[in-house]
Image (cartoon, rainbow, N blue to C red):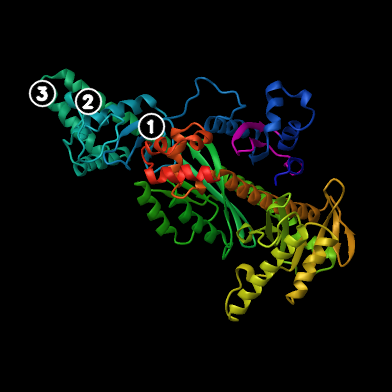
Amino acid sequence: MFVIEDELKKLPQKPGVYIMHDAHDAIIYVGKAKVLKNRVRQYFQDPERLMPKIRKMVPQIKWFEYIVVDSEMEALVLECNLIKEHRPKYNAMLKDDKMYPYIKCTISEDFPRVFITRRYQRDKEKYFGPYTNAGACRETMELLRKLYKIRNCSRVIKEGEKTKPCLYKHIGQCDAPCNAEITKEEYGKIIDEVLHFLNGDTDTVIKNLKKKMTEASERMEFELAAEYRDKINAINALKQDQKATDFKTEERDIIAFYAEDDRAVVQVFFMRGGRMIGREHYFFKGLESTEPSYVIGDFLKQYYSGTAYVPSEILTEAEPEDLELILQWLSESKGKKVHLITPKKGTKERMIELAKENAQIVFKQDMDKLTREANRTVRAQEELADLIGLENVVRMESYDISNISGFLNVASMVVCENGKLKKNDYRKFRIKTVSGPDDYACMREVLTRRFQHGLDELKKMDETDEITGFGRLPDLLLMDGGKGQVNIAKEVLGELGLDIPVCGMVKDDRHRTRGLYFENKEIPIDVHGEGFKLLTRIQDETHRFAIEYHKSLRGKNQIHSVLDDIKGIGPAKRKILMKNFKTLEEIKEADIETLSKIEGISEKLAEEIYNFFRCN
């Protein structure tokens, strides 16, 4: 459980960006801070000092995270990028907000589309960019359509299907796959050429365009030659833009980790178009080794086999094992050479240090979370066992009876192992031998059935068989009540020859647990301790499970109709009758002739219905 007051105490005295989440884990606010500890704490102090908008936001914050950076300027840049990326509800958004464009190819479709998008998604498609020169990007897109006649529509086209082609077919800019005028294989070869072009293999295209430009000029078709010239200039502009990207606005992933024992957190910073647009962290458990080369190598193989995008450059804190093999695989996946660098100095090394620092923060937060979870579960159960003087309590079972004035007596069995409710082992019972409101008799039946069944299962097992089901006997029995319920349980266990400790959960006048009844004495319990909280969860769950079962049985009884008692009437015939008569009284008063006129009701069945209501 994320406790905001506790997490505020752990905030570092460093610059960074903080990210607020609501109950659904959605990001609702992103802010920057010169000192994270001072800035974030301000949100949870005097609300009167906050702006109305922020005052409205604070109650919705259920948890927060943060990213440590080197300076306030870096925090400002990161804040802007995260706001653009996530568009949080409580951040002010610019109307003219823009991101650099990508060219996207939908390679998962039978007849792929190629178009410009400003939204990069982690899907199965191919992305190229981002491009800082949007004009050159658009001109290149137009050039691709004219050169390769790729489709410009958003239709979902399957091979062999035919629809009326659009205008682009008639002006010679589309090969009309929608009208089956080109096969999937032929179109696929064109798309392969387009992908090579977008990957930077433009020399062949430029060579062909220059040849066409010269030929047009020799024919004195100067307008056509000028068009070819403009296309060459557009490609050259794109090439220049890509060169700038390679050296100044490189797309890269920065990877570092923090590990203890057999666990690690790997932090990835994403740089796109020279901007840091976000980060992700990943948990590793059960590591064979925490050697940097092992952790980095294992992460690279798992992460990039499941991501759609591989950057041109990857910065890591250590060279992975099988470096050459991994580089070859990444390069083939991207379609161009990928560089993996382990920086030793300068800005790139500082980025690795920041990623590692943030990985350590996430790791410590996770360990704190695990510690809190252990306190809620295993240690809470140990606290209960210590309170009554027992050792090695792993499995506890709790029982409750539910009825309404003795109507539909039912019982619930709830299981708790190592402080966690084990829902797969829950059982429910419908009382068979008791009628009327007698909780003691009901409990006697339930416990007898449960433990007799368990003993029968154990007798059938060999020594090598795994004990499952009712054969797994509890280390402690929890009864929802005091002395009376405990004595019933002890009698049943004694009759069956079982020696299982039994503890009662004693309630006060307001029906709240005030202590435990064990070995003929009441033991007080600290109502602020984790043991008491676990006991309350078990008690509430036992009540809930019994009551829900009782409700479901009551519902089934209420659904039952008197018509179901008539021979030959099932759900279908009942539906026919209720459709043709407004009320049950009308059915009762109908004669045989009226009933038999209804489609689906035979004369014989009409007689059954008529006689049923006359004899009952």
The reply to whether residue 346 is visible in this rendering is: no
Q: Which residue is mark 3?
A: 218
Front position in the image: 254 or 407? 407
Residue 472: x %, y % from top left: 65, 70
What residue is pinned by disc 1?
A: 241
Q: Which residues are magenta?
A: 9-34
Badges 3 and 1: C-beta atoms under 8 Å apart? no
> Badge 2 is on which residue?
166
Q: Secondary structure at mark 3?
A: helix
- For image coordinates 22% across by 41% down, the residue present is 159
Asked whether the beta carbons under mark 2 and mark 1 sit within 8 Å of each other, the answer is no
- Counting residues from the start of the chain, the first of labels 3 and 1 encountered is 3
Residue closest to the eye, 173 or 70: 173
At label 3, which amino acid type do we have?
Glu
User: Which is more foreground, mark 3 or mark 1?
Assistant: 1
Q: How many marks?
A: 3
- The residue that appears at 71% across and 36% down in the rendered structure is 36
Front residue of 291 and 547: 547
Residue 569 coordinates in the image, percent (x, y):
45, 47
- 24 part of magenta stretch: yes
Q: Quadrant of residue 326?
A: bottom left
Q: Cα distance, mark 3 to mark 2?
A: 35 Å
Label 2 amino acid? Cys
Q: Secondary structure at mark 2?
A: loop
Q: Is residue 369 left or right of residue 292?
A: right
Does residue 532 lie above or below 270 as drawn? below
